[in-house]
Image (tube, rainbow, N blue to C red):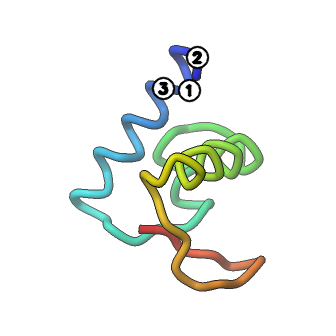
Amino acid sequence: MGNRKAGNALALLERLYFQPIFNVDNAAEITQVSYSNANKLIKELCEIELLKEITGNKRNRFFV
């Protein structure tokens, strides 16, 4: 994970204290990146079990 991506991941994880449930749109806004990049970041954080998808849907997903 590069420095920029690590910084975005940190910003997203810090926001969990104030907003524990969010979607990809929220993540894109928090990290100020595109929807696609926010989605990739969330996928990586889910793979290392720092985030969890809670809806079971392929669309309109929420994460904690």
Q: CB under 8 Å between callouts 2 and 1? A: yes
Residue 29, given in percent of the width and then of the height, sits at 53, 49
Residue 32, given in percent of the width and then of the height, sits at 56, 38
Residue type indicated by callout 1: Lys
Q: How many numbered marks are there?
A: 3
Q: Quadrant of the N terminus?
A: top right
Nearer-the-camera pick, 31 or 50: 50
Q: Compute the Cα span from label 2 to label 1.
A: 5 Å
Residue 5, given in percent of the width and then of the height, sits at 56, 26
What residue is rendered at 46% in x and 46% in y?
30
Nearer-the-camera pick, 60 or 52: 52
Q: Which residue is mark 2?
A: 2
Q: Which mark is residue 6?
A: 3
Secondary structure state at the residue bearing disc 3: helix
Q: CB under 8 Å between callouts 3 and 2? A: yes
- Pointer 3 local density, CA inside 10 Å: few below 14, some 14–19, many at least 20: few
Q: Quadrant of the C terminus?
A: bottom left
Q: Where 61 sits versus 8, above or below?
A: below
What residue is rendered at 55% in x and 55% in y?
46
